[in-house]
Amino acid sequence: MIAAVSEPGIDAELVARYRRDPELFTEVHDRYYRDIYRYVAGRLDTQIAEDITAETFLLAFDQRDRFDPELGGLRPWLFGFATNLIARHRRKETRRYRALARLEPEPVVEGHENRVVTSVTAQRMQPHLAKALAALSGGERDVLLLVALGQLGYDEIAQALGIAVGTVGSRLSRARAKMLALIDKEMIRG
């Protein structure tokens, strides 16, 4: 699939048309949706990519009168909205991990002999894991979670994030080292 390219003449024509009739903004959506979605999905998971891509076009529609074709094309303008929304999403994700880290583990109810030890351990580890995840850089966290939750290989992660396979390896190595150090530190404290 070939990406749509911003062409000054086409973008200027689209802008002139949707300024006369806002319903024609759908042509902007149709022309650039795939590119924006692929970019967001490469940075976040596909479920969130759909939401953020939709929000990108909603913001662009709301601010359509601010677009100036003399400053650049519609495509980079849309990518700017998407990038800002991704950054906002990542800040929320970091705050969520920090909040989880502040939670006290639920007390273990003794007596039920079929209780699985790993489940109890995981429950007790949740705040420590969340705190350690929040301390990672966004890139390190992305790679680690793509391995742990998405079960992707290095090549798949490189493709999803648009980075080199070697970068995946170095980020994962740093993330693992930081996680181990932070968890060890927390376990000694706690």
Image: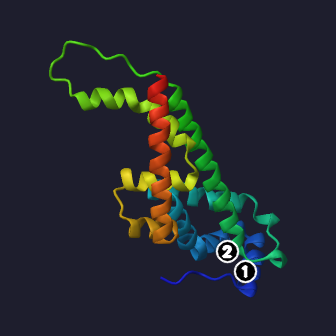
Q: Which mark is residue 11?
A: 1
Residue 96, relative to residue 13: is it above or below? above
Q: Which mark is residue 75?
A: 2
* Image colouring: rainbow
Q: Quadrant of residue 112?
A: top left
Residue 55, relative to residue 129: is it above or below? below
Amino acid type at circle 1 is: Asp
Residue at point 64% right, 53% down?
87
Amino acid type at circle 2 is: Arg
Residue at point 55% right, 62% down?
40
Of marks 1 and 2, which one's residue comes earlier in the chain? 1
Q: Quadrant of residue 151?
A: bottom left
Point out residue 9 in the picture as x, y percentages from the top left corner.
75, 87
Point out residue 94 in the picture as x, y percentages from the top left corner.
57, 42
Please tell me whether mark 1 sits on a helix, a strand or a loop. Answer: helix
Whether residue 33 can be seen here: yes
Point out residue 68 in the picture as x, y percentages from the top left corner.
82, 72
